[in-house]
Each structure stands twice: as C-alpha cells, then as structure tokens.
Image (cartoon, rainbow, N blue to C red):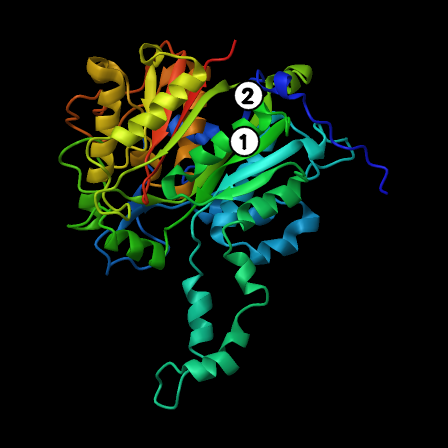
C-alpha cells in the first residue's frame, strides 16, 4: 500500500446543494494566451481573422482564418522542463489544450504538479477532474505525405503493398498518439496530476459546453472539488479547411480581402464562417473549496442543459430551422439555474455566420424569450477569433465570465441587419449583468446551454 489517504467523497445530500464557481479562465485564441489580450481586442472591436499565412490556401473557396502566430505561443515554454520530450507527440490541438490549461491554472492561483517549487498542491490531486472537448484530429499533412512518398511503385503511383511493408515505418514512433482526441485530456491530467474523474467529449462545436456541464455535475455530486474543463481544436490546415468547405459552412467567393468582413452572425447577407484555432480551459471549483482558499471568482456556473437537434438531413449538416430542440437545452439550463427567461441579461450564442446554424439559434432565442429577444444583447465571438470548433463554447464561456466581472459588453462586428435580435455591429458598452446564457448548436446536431451568474 502507498499510504496515501483515500479521496473523500461528499455525502450525496450535501453534494446536491454544492454551488460551482469559475475561479480561473484560460482562453487560447489567435490573440494569444489568456483572457486579457482576447478581452482587449473584443472591447476595441479588433478581429484576428486574416488571410491564411500558414499554407497556400489559394485553391480553396475560403482563404481567411484566425491563426495563432508562433511568436505568441510555443508549447515548449508552457510545460515543465521534465515534460518537454512529450511535446513531440502533441498535435496542434493537444498543444492548444495544454497551453489553455496552464493559463487557467495560473489564473486561478492553483499550485499543481506542474508548478515550480516544492509547494504542496492547492487541492488534493485525487479531488481534481478534467473534462475536455476535442475534435477528430487530422494528421499533419507534411508528416503523412513524406511517409506516403516512400511507398511508390516503379511508375510513381502509390503502392499499398509497399506501404504495408516499409512505408508505414517512415512515420514517427508513437505517431498514432498524436492524433487521438482523448490525448488533450490525457496530457493535461498528467501535467497537472488530475486524478479525479476525466472524460473527452467529441461533439463538434458543442464539445466544450458539454464538457463544462459534465464537470459541473461531477462537482455537484461530490466526486471532485475542482475540474479543468473546456476544449480546444484547430481546423486551420488543409484537411480541416477542405472538410468545412465540402460542408458548405465557410465564406466563399472573392479574394481574401473581400472575405474579411463577410462573417456576419444573424445577418441575412452572411456568406458563411471562417475557421479559427483555439479554445479554452476553465477552472471550475466547488464554492466551499474556493471560499476556503480565498479564490478570486469570475462567476457561478449556475445551470446546464443539453439536447439533440432533429436535423432535416439526418446527419446534422442542416440545422432544424425552427430551433425547437435547441430551445429545450436553453430551457433546461434556465430551470437548472432556477431562473426565468426574464432574468437573462445577455446571450453568447455560437453565432458563426453559417446560415442554417444562425437560423436555428435565432429561432430558439425567439422561442424562449419571445418579444424580449429583440432587446437582449447578443455577444458574437466568432467574427473576432473564428470558429474554434470544439473549443468555441469554451471561448464563449470565458468571455461571458469576463463580461460578468467587468460589467461590460464587448463590441460586435460586421453584421448590419439582424432581424429580431440585438446582434448588429456596435461598440463595447457598460452593462448591468446578472445572468448570461451561453448556447450552441453544432455540426452533427448536439446542443448545449449553460447559464453563468454574477457571483457575490
């Protein structure tokens, strides 16, 4: 036996009343690491969407994205020195999650195994969980192509037999471990020694919100005192861009310059979305634990709901136009938070500029909020940082938490007309914010909604 004390569970009746607080936020976007560069850009109305620079996108219909520049993020400077060799088996998605987790942990003032020095962990590692949303990671094109090129027949064509005999051996050792979706949570839990409940959710743009909801339930029922939760993804690569183009979700037509202002959430003139790389990890913590250590609190995660769209095309490429099932997720989150629809002061939707998705979200908002839908401020993040896919709802949640702390709404970009919604372009402004709804639908049709409440 190791002599380590067993983790203590919370009695179920006490756990049912546990409140869950957000004590750290770690967004990672094209603006860099952390909430401050993101928030400053949102308030100033500055977008990170640019012509794609990482590869030649001239053959694609969409030539813009929000890329995280190398000078703003290097995962080797984030992980402990003893863990740097492991970065060789990190795909870009994993790097983003690791960077976001480190930022969130630091923002929350936690000491974990990754912290420098000999201080004991702030929270018993057995009481910290991790639930992280991920995408279906595509292999690095250059890495795979170099191996494929070694499996050619005499006439230069690809030969499957040669690939099976020798070509595959030209892939880097442990190649597969770079591309498993669960490796985001795997690396984060190893680095920070999270020994509590852990899970990976791969439900496209709903992944992060679903992960936050799962972490909330784990803490509420007493199986953990804190969780690292959220998600990260990038599709800013050849395969990601191609798949999204085939799904008819991206801005197309014209050159890159003409596409930059075309991401217009809830505007009938929108031509689609643009991709971004990023996401975020949030530190969720039981109120009792946060209070005991004197943590600074952004907000309370007060409610969660989820549902599945009844998609007209059966595979989730086209969202249901009437927003009925998405409204179920929103109503469940409101009920879970003990709130009426009249008590929501702002909404942070997916708001991607994808016509079918925006139509579904707008319809759901009108279903839930009725005539009041036209007067509730909408915060649209995608025109700033692109569609971060599995990480998008984590970015939205971090922004919502910051809105509550600052009592301010960010600027809105691009949209000129948003019938029935308060989502047209406008400057940042102060606001009295008590409760904010974060909601999203997704490619595939999964829906999720969370309610953040101002903490006092």
Name the foreground residue: 41 vs 361. Answer: 361
The residue at the point 62 percent across, 54 percent down is 86
The residue at the point 50 percent across, 57 percent down is 179
Q: Pointers 1 and 2 in contact (CB under 8 A)? A: yes
**Residue 197 can be seen, yes or no:** yes
Q: Residue 245, how many percent across, how many down?
A: 25, 53
**Residue 28 can be seen, yes or no:** no
Image quadrant in which the N terminus is located: top right
Residue 7 to residue 80: above or below: above
Name the foreground residue: 217 vs 163. Answer: 217
Q: Check disc 1: other Cα within 10 Å, few if <14, some if 14-19, many if 20+.
A: many
Q: Residue furthest front?
A: 13
Name the foreground residue: 26 vs 449. Answer: 449
Q: Residue 22, how many percent across, how many down?
A: 53, 23
Q: Which residue is mark 2?
A: 20
Q: Residue 281, how many percent across, how many down?
A: 51, 35
Q: Check disc 2: other Cα within 10 Å, few if <14, some if 14-19, many if 20+.
A: many
Q: CA distance from mark 1 to mark 2?
A: 9 Å
The tally of labels here is 2
Q: Is residue 191 left or right of residue 248?
A: right
User: Which quadrant of the structure image shows residue 425?
Assistant: top left
Q: Which mark is first along the chain, 2 or 1? A: 2
Q: Which residue is mark 1?
A: 215
| SS type, badge 2 | strand
Q: Residue 98, how many percent across, how many down?
A: 56, 43
Q: Is residue 157 left or right of residue 453?
A: left
Q: Residue furthest bottom?
A: 154
């Amino acid at each position: 036996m190791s002599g380590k004390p067993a983790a203590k569970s919370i009695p179920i009746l006490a756990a049912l009343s546990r409140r869950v607080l957000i004590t750290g936020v770690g967004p990672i976007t094209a603006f860099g690491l952390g909430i401050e560069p993101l928030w400053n850009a949102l308030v100033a109305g500055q977008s990170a969407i640019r012509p794609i620079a990482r590869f030649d996108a001239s053959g694609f219909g969409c030539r813009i994205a929000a890329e995280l520049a190398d000078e703003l993020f290097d995962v080797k400077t984030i992980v402990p020195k003893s863990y740097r060799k492991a970065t060789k088996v990190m795909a870009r998605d994993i790097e983003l999650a690791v960077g976001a987790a480190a930022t969130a942990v630091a923002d929350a003032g936690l000491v974990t195994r990754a912290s420098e020095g000999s201080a004991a962990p702030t929270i018993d590692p057995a009481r910290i969980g991790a639930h992280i949303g991920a995408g279906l990671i595509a292999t690095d094109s250059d890495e795979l192509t170099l191996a494929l090129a070694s499996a050619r027949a005499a006439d230069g064509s690809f030969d499957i037999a040669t690939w099976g005999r020798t070509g595959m051996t030209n892939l880097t050792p442990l190649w597969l471990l770079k591309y498993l979706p669960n490796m985001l949570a795997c690396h984060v839990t190893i680095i920070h020694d999270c020994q509590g409940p852990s899970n990976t959710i791969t439900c496209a743009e709903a992944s992060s919100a679903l992960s936050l909801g799962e972490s909330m339930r784990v803490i509420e029922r007493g199986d953990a005192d804190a969780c690292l939760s959220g998600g990260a993804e990038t599709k800013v690569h050849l395969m990601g861009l191609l798949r999204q183009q085939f799904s008819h979700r991206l801005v197309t037509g014209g050159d890159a310059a003409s596409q930059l202002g075309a991401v217009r959430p809830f505007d009938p003139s929108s031509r689609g979305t643009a991709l971004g790389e990023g996401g975020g990890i949030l530190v969720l913590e039981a109120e009792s634990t946060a209070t005991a250590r004197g943590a600074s609190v952004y907000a309370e995660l007060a409610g969660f709901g989820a549902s599945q769209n009844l998609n007209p095309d059966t595979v989730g490429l086209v969202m249901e136009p009437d927003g009925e099932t998405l409204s179920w997720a929103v109503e469940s989150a409101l009920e879970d938070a003990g709130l009426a629809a009249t008590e929501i002061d702002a909404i942070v939707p997916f708001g991607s500029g994808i016509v079918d998705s925006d139509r579904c979200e707008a319809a759901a908002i009108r279903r839930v909020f009725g005539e009041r839908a036209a007067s509730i401020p909408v915060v649209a993040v995608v025109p700033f940082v692109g569609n971060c896919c599995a990480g998008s709802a984590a970015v939205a949640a971090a922004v919502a938490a910051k809105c509550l702390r600052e009592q301010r709404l960010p600027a809105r970009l691009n949209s000129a007309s948003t019938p029935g919604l308060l989502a047209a372009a406008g400057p940042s402004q102060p606001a009295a914010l008590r409760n904010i709804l974060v909601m999203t639908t997704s490619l595939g049709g999964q829906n999720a909604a969370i309610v953040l409440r101002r903490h006092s």
